[in-house]
Structures are given as C-alpha cells and as structure tokens.
C-alpha cells in the first residue's frame, strides 16, 4: 500500500515538475508548480510527517504561491517581448551541474543507507519537533529568525528607495 | 486482514456520507439563505416550487444545468475550466477534518466520525481554507475581463492578510488545548467543563472576522462587490459553471469553517445528553448551524467595507490585537497551566 502511494505521488510530482519547466505561459507554470508543491505535501503525509506536510501546505502552497500568482498575473505579458531563442551560455554552465546532481543522486541511491522513518518519527510530530527546536537547536533557530528579520528590513529599505527615487 | 477490510469499508462509508451530506446541504443552504433573507427584508422568499419553496434548489440546479454554455472571447480555456475545480475541491476537502461527533463502537471497533484524524487538523484547515483562493484567482485571470481580474486580485490580497490573523487567532486556542488535533481540543474542553470562548472571546471575534473574509461574505466580500465589479471574479461564468462558485465559497466553505469554529470555541459535541445516543451529533449540528445563522444574519444586514479598508484593517488592527492576545495567553498557560 505504501509503495503504491509513493509511486503515485512520486510520479505526479515528477510530471508536474517537468510541466513547470516545459510549459510556456507563466501562469500555467504556476499551476504546474502548485501541483508539484501539493504532491510533495502528499508525500510528507504518506511518510506520517504530518507537521511538515501542514507547513508545506500553509507556507508554500498558500502564502508563497499566492504571492507568485499575484505578481505574475499583474504583469501584462502580451506587451513584454519574450526571449524565444536558445540559452547557449546558460547551457554550458548548467550541464556540469546537471551531471553532478544526477551523479550525486545515483551515488546516494546505490550506496547510502536510508534510515527507517517509521521507527524514528514520534507519534506526535508537533510537540516533538517543538521540543527539539527550542532546546537542542535554539541557537540556529534564533539566528535564522534574526537573518530573516534583517532580510525583511533590507527589502523594506530597497522598496522605499525605489518609491522615493 | 479482516481489520484492514473493515477499516477500508469504514473509510469509504465516511467519505461517501460526508460528500453526500455536504453537497446536499450545500444545495439546500441556498434555499435556507433565500428564505432567511426574504424574511429579514419583509419578503416571503421562494414559495412557488414545492411546499415552502422546498424544491427550489432542484429547480435552480436544473435551470443552471440547461443553460446554453457561453464561453467569452480570449479566455484561457484550460484554466477557465480548472478554476471551477480549484474552487470546489478545497471547500470539500475542508470537511475531511471536521469531527461530527464523539467516537462510537461498531462490531467491537472504535470508529471516529471524521474522515482523516490528523495531528495537524487546524493547520490543514488554514491551508485548505485559503487554497480556495486559487479558484477565485485563476477564474478572474482566465476570464480575460477587467472586472473579474480586479475581483480576483482583491481576493488574493484579502486571503494573504486574513490568513495571518486567522493563524494567530486560532493559535491561542491551540496553546490552551496543547494540541492541534480536533478530538484533543474538544476533549480538553469537555474535561475542564469550560468552552474556550470563555477564555478566548477576543480570539473568537477575530476568528469570526477571518471566517467572513475567507469565505467572501459581507462585510468583506470586496472581490464580488456587485456595485463596483458586477459580481467580480465569476462575472464571465454562466450556467452550472457559475453555480459552483457560490456553492463552494458561500456555503461549503462557510459551513466547514463554522464547524471548525464550533470545535475550537464551543466545545464541539459537548452538551447535555437530552437527545439519547445521538445527542453529541445533534449538539454539534445545532452549534454549527447557530454560527451559520449568525453569518447569514451579518451578511444580510451590514453594508460592505471599502476595498482599501479591508486589508488595512487586517494588518493595522486585527493582527496586533491577535498577537497581544496570543502573548497574553502564552503567559497565562505558562504560569497557570
């Protein structure tokens, strides 16, 4: 049963990721991307990582994609001249990275030992994750929130400069 | 193996019952709303089709389905059709985490009247509640009409801001209950004997605001403001394609969010056992429909906010209030709990 769920969810994820790359219209890209995010959330559910799935849904599928859609839909695409050629320079840089990624993934698939998720995950995801986050990883957690705060202030300052000038 | 078959059958039955009940109820809520609005405005509402106009939803459905399908010019056909599903599916999915009553036993197995008893049910509600915005957003964009598009942009802005407030408002209840599981939340209210609305009146009012905003009800229905935008995002849809949008947004979404509000603030199915074995279910429905009644009442009495005020109201007033409320609750739980 679990294997079946994984195969279905995984193939949906792969197809929608491919769709997000290959489709031309920017809005359709967002729809495919949304499908991809949802299938990732589904795979978290299948692995019994409820909290991760919920956060994936709330943060990515709702907040971030809504912002993307909001921005993309307001751009008058018919007035923008789109690049219709072939990305040569980008391809030269992308190919090594592509093969490196494929190699790493293959190496991991054949050599790495995967931990048994079922045994490691506690029944109550939320409280377990909260406990670990606020005891063992409190310093990285606070640092990350501080960096995000700085980024937010920076974004506001940049936005103000544009608005004034 | 026997257990597995039993579980599969139970899940299938649950899904079928929830689907049938919610979709049927969604249709009949149109009748209820029209009757209610009629009496509120000293009219009589639908009376012609059937006794008390009870067959009116069926007649409406038939009328909508037999309309000529008209597609506007220059639309994005795929998205135009997909948006309908994108509006409907999250609204139905919301009912997956609604607990309709206490758990009971069938043939020695404990059965909980909920489709998916998730640990993170409340997070899931936030996600699905705002996922409905995609239906509105893409419907507005795909119809290639300025009215529709402005409506969908308004809806997106509204969802992004009220989602945050909703999260902080419900978080204070989660803090009190110590869990995001709907059964745990109700159980902790039954155990202490006090509904959370007593502890969290501010949070309940904020939740109510967000309920109205997320489901596009007056006074927050700026995305379909009839006076400025005709009917906003769904102006280019016709027939049953149009009918799905109000069904999903005004009825299913409101009903599900009212049920969740009942779980969070009114102790779910708790109440005196005066209806025999079904008293839990009946209490739950009574509370949910009480809230729904309130939503309809607000809808048919209040005027609409201006579009520019709605988002400002969320960020400048509701969000600070909800954060202060949350911090106060955290202190309360830390020192007293």
Image: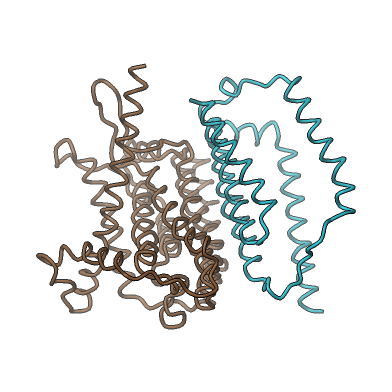
Q: Please tell me the colour of chain B.
A: brown
Q: Please tell me the colour of chain A.
A: cyan
Establish if B259 lies above or below B221: above
Residue A121 visible to the viewer: yes
Q: Position of residue B123 (x, y in %)?
A: 50, 46
Left or right of B241? Residue B290 is: left
- The N terminus of chain B lies in quadrant: top left
Q: Residue at x 18, y 73 (%)?
A: B45
Q: Residue at x 29, y 23 (%)?
A: B109
Establish if B335 lies above or below B4: below
Q: Residue furthest top?
A: B1
Left or right of B39? Residue B66 is: right
Q: Position of residue B38 (x, y in %)?
A: 21, 74
Q: Residue furthest bottom?
A: B227
**Nearer-the-camera pick, B126 or B131:** B131
Q: Position of residue B168 (x, y in %)?
A: 52, 53
Indicate the colouring scheme: by chain
**Nearer-the-camera pick, A5 or A47:** A5
Q: How many marks?
A: 0
**Nearer-the-camera pick, B159 or A82:** A82
């Amino acid at each position: 049963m679990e294997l079946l769920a994984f195969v279905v969810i995984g193939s949906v994820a792969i197809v929608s990721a491919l769709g997000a790359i290959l489709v031309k219209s920017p809005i359709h890209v967002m729809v495919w991307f949304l499908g991809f995010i949802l299938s990732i959330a589904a795979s978290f559910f299948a692995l019994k990582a409820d909290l991760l799935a919920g956060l994936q849904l709330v943060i990515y599928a709702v907040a971030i994609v809504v912002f993307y859609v909001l921005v993309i839909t307001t751009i008058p695409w018919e007035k923008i001249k789109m690049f219709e050629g072939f990305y040569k320079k980008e391809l030269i840089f992308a190919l090594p990275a592509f093969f490196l990624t494929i190699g790493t993934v293959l190496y991991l698939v054949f050599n790495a030992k995967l931990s048994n998720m079922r045994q490691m995950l506690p029944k109550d995801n939320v409280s377990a994750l909260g406990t670990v986050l606020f005891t063992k990883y409190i310093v990285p957690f606070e640092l990350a929130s501080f960096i995000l705060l700085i980024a937010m202030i920076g974004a506001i300052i940049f936005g103000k400069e544009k608005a004034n000038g | 193996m026997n257990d597995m078959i039993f579980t599969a059958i139970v899940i299938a039955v649950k899904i079928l019952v929830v689907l049938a009940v919610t979709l049927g109820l969604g249709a009949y809520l149109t009748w209820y709303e029209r009757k209610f609005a009629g009496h509120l405005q000293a009219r009589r509402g639908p009376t012609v089709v059937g006794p008390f106009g009870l067959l009116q939803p069926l007649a409406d459905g038939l009328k909508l389905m037999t309309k000529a399908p008209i597609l506007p010019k220059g639309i994005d056909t795929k998205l135009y059709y997909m948006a309908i599903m994108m509006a409907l599916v999250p609204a139905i999915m919301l009912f997956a985490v609604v607990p309709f009553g206490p758990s009971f036993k069938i043939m020695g197995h404990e059965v909980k009247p909920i489709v998916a008893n998730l640990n993170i049910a409340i997070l899931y509600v936030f996600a699905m509640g705002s996922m409905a915005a995609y239906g509105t957003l893409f419907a507005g964009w795909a119809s290639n009409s300025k009215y529709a598009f402005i409506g969908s942009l308004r809806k997106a802005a509204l969802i992004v801001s009220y989602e945050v407030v909703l999260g902080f408002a419900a978080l204070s209840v989660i803090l009190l209950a110590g869990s995001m599981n709907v059964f745990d939340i109700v159980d902790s209210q039954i155990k202490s004997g006090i509904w959370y609305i007593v502890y969290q009146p501010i949070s309940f009012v904020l939740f109510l605001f967000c309920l109205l905003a997320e489901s596009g009800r007056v006074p927050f229905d700026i995305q379909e403001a009839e006076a400025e935008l005709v009917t906003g995002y769904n102006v280019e849809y016709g027939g049953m394609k149009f009918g799905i949008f109000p069904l999903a947004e005004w009825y299913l979404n409101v009903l599900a969010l009212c049920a969740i509000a009942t779980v969070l603030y009114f102790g779910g199915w708790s109440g005196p056992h005066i209806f025999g074995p079904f008293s839990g279910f009946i209490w739950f429905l009574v509370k949910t429909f009480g809230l729904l009644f309130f939503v309809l009442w607000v809808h048919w009495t209040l005027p609409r906010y201006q579009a520019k005020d709605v988002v400002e109201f969320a960020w400048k007033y509701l969000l600070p209030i909800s954060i202060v409320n949350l911090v106060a609750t955290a202190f309360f739980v830390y020192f007293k709990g």
